[in-house]
Structure formats: C-alpha cells, structure tokens
Image: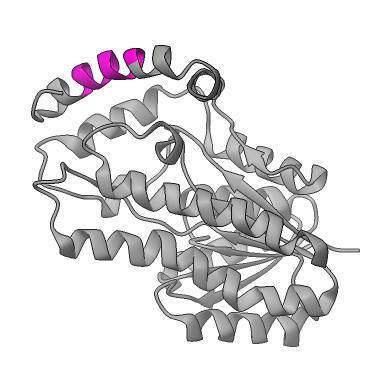
C-alpha cells in the first residue's frame, strides 16, 4: 500500500528533505506551507522523484487550515498515514530581554502548531484504525542552553506533548515519534527573532559545521516510523550528552555550565 504523508513546513529545510525522501519511496506526499511559490515547486520535485505530490496552503496558527488539509487528503487519497508536525521558528534571548510578544509568537507556532496538527488528525487516525504522528522538536528541548529561553521552552513543550500522546493514543494504533536534532544545515535562522547582535551568523556557522544533513535527519525519521520507535536523536555527540544528563546529572550540570559560559560570552550575554 502506498504511504500517504502530510508535512507542515514542507516547502523548505527539513520538511522538503523529508518530502523528497518519501517521494523516492513512491509515497504520496502532501506539503502544507504558507509559501505557495515554494510549495508548488516542491510539489513538482516530489513528482519528479517518484512520488505523487500535493501542495495545500497551511498556516499552523489556524486550526481551520488543518481541517481543510485533512478534508483534502480524505477526498483525494482516502486518508493519511503519517502526519509530520514540522513547521517551526526560532528565537534567542534572555529572560529579561525577550518580549512577551516574541514568547507568544514562538509558542503559538512551535507548540500550538503541533497541538493543532495532532488535534485535527487524531479523529481521522482513530477512524482509520491507525496512523503516525512525527513531531519535530529539538535537542534544545532536552539540553536547555542559556539565551534560548523561549525556543527551549517551545521545544520542551513539543517533547512533553509527544510523550503524553505516545501513551494516550497507543491503544488506538496511533504511533508517535519525537524528533530532536541538534544543529544541521537548514533555513531556521531566516525567520529568527533576537536582539543579540550576530546571533544568526553564529548559529549559521554552527549549522554549516555539522556533519549531519537534513537528508540524514529525514532518513532517521522514516526509519522511526517504520520501526515505530519514539525518539529520533540523529546527532551522536548530543545523544551521548543526553544520556549523561539522565544518568550523571551532576557531571552534566558542571559540563553544561562550562559550555554555557563560553556560549554566553560568544553571544554577548550576561555571565552565567
């Protein structure tokens, strides 16, 4: 049976890489995005790579957009097998300097955007007797570096929601995967909000140095759905640090503090 996939934020970055990975497997891939020009371009790329592409406009801040996407998928493909809540934005700043407006902006997109996706498609998955949610969080939600307050909280929220739904929905045949990558090359900084001078350039440098690509993360996601595994942790170093945090929290705290001082100095923040 041909896999049917819906990806928010599918017109660029990780979303596009995942769409093309599924396309090469012959899947039907619908991307939801706020950029019609890029979205239609990726729809064509999906078709050119062996899949069946479809683009729908979807702003993750609007539940009716998700409802419309669901109805379209039921009408055209008879349903959907995998829903990837990928769309997200970034911000950086301290608790003193980040405005409440920026907090509300990032939580509305990064957390409530995932909530809306899960809320809109859970009834369909129950009706179908199964399905899979892939919720894209970040290592930021596990490692919690300074000067990333609102971003860390938003991604920790996605992790908490994913763990909750993994238990809540399992009896209905609904699988949940939670994706927590560290830095890799993407376009996340294009919409980044921050008052820290040079933050976008510094983050871009870290992404360029990463040995992990968007395609690597996409392939890890596909494997997680196939194997029905919860965690998707594609960066080896950060995965080891997360294990250290769980089993040797005092050592992790000391190492994190030392790294935080270097990070805050580079970012021009207050001393840790």
Which picture quadrant has residue 271? top left
Q: Quarter of the image containing the N terminus?
A: bottom right
Q: Quarter of the image containing the C terminus?
A: top left
Which picture quadrant has residue 119? bottom right
How many labels sit on residues? Answer: 0
Residue 171 can be seen in this image: yes
Q: Nearer the viewer, residue 130 or 39?
A: 130
Visual colour scheme = one colour
Q: In the displayed structure, does residue 16 sit left or right of residue 100?
A: right
Farthest-out residue, front: 250
- In the image, is residue 34 above or below residue 98? below
Residue 173 can be seen in this image: no
x and y, in percent, of residue 104 in the image: 26, 65
Q: In the displayed structure, does residue 175 sit left or right of residue 153?
A: right
Q: Is 177 colored magenta in this rendering? A: no
- In the image, is residue 69 above or below residue 21? below
x and y, in percent, of residue 129 in the image: 85, 72
Q: In the displayed structure, does residue 272 sit left or right of residue 46?
A: left
- In the image, is residue 20 above or below residue 262? below
Q: Residue placed at 73% from the left, 79% from the top?
A: 124
Q: Nearer the viewer, residue 78 or 254?
A: 254
Q: Which residues are magenta?
A: 254-263
Q: Residue placed at 46% from the left, 59% from the top?
A: 87
């Amino acid at each position: 049976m041909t896999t049917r996939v819906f990806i928010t934020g599918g017109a660029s970055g990780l979303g596009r890489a995942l769409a093309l990975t599924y396309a090469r497997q012959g899947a039907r891939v619908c991307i939801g995005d706020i950029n019609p020009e890029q979205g239609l371009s990726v729809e064509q790329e999906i078709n050119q790579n062996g899949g069946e592409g479809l683009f729908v406009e979807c702003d993750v801040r609007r539940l009716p957009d998700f409802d419309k996407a669901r109805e379209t998928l039921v009408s055209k493909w008879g349903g959907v097998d995998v829903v990837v809540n990928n769309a997200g934005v970034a911000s950086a700043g301290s608790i003193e300097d980040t405005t409440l407006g920026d907090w509300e902006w990032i939580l509305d997109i990064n957390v409530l955007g995932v909530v809306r996706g899960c809320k809109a498609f859970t009834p369909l998955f129950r009706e179908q007797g199964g399905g899979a949610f892939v919720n894209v969080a970040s290592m930021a939600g596990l490692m919690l570096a300074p000067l990333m307050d609102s971003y860390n909280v938003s991604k920790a929220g996605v992790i908490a929601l994913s763990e909750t739904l993994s238990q809540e929905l399992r009896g209905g045949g609904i699988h949940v995967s939670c994706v927590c990558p560290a830095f890799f090359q993407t376009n996340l900084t294009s919409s980044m909000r921050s008052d820290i001078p040079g933050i976008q350039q510094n983050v871009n440098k870290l992404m360029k140095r990463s040995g992990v690509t968007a395609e690597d993360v996409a392939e890890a996601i596909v494997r997680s759905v196939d194997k029905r595994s919860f965690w998707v942790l594609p960066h080896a170093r950060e995965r080891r640090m997360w294990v250290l945090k769980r089993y040797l929290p005092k050592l992790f705290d000391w190492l994190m503090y030392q790294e935080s001082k270097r990070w805050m100095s580079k970012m021009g923040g207050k001393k840790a």
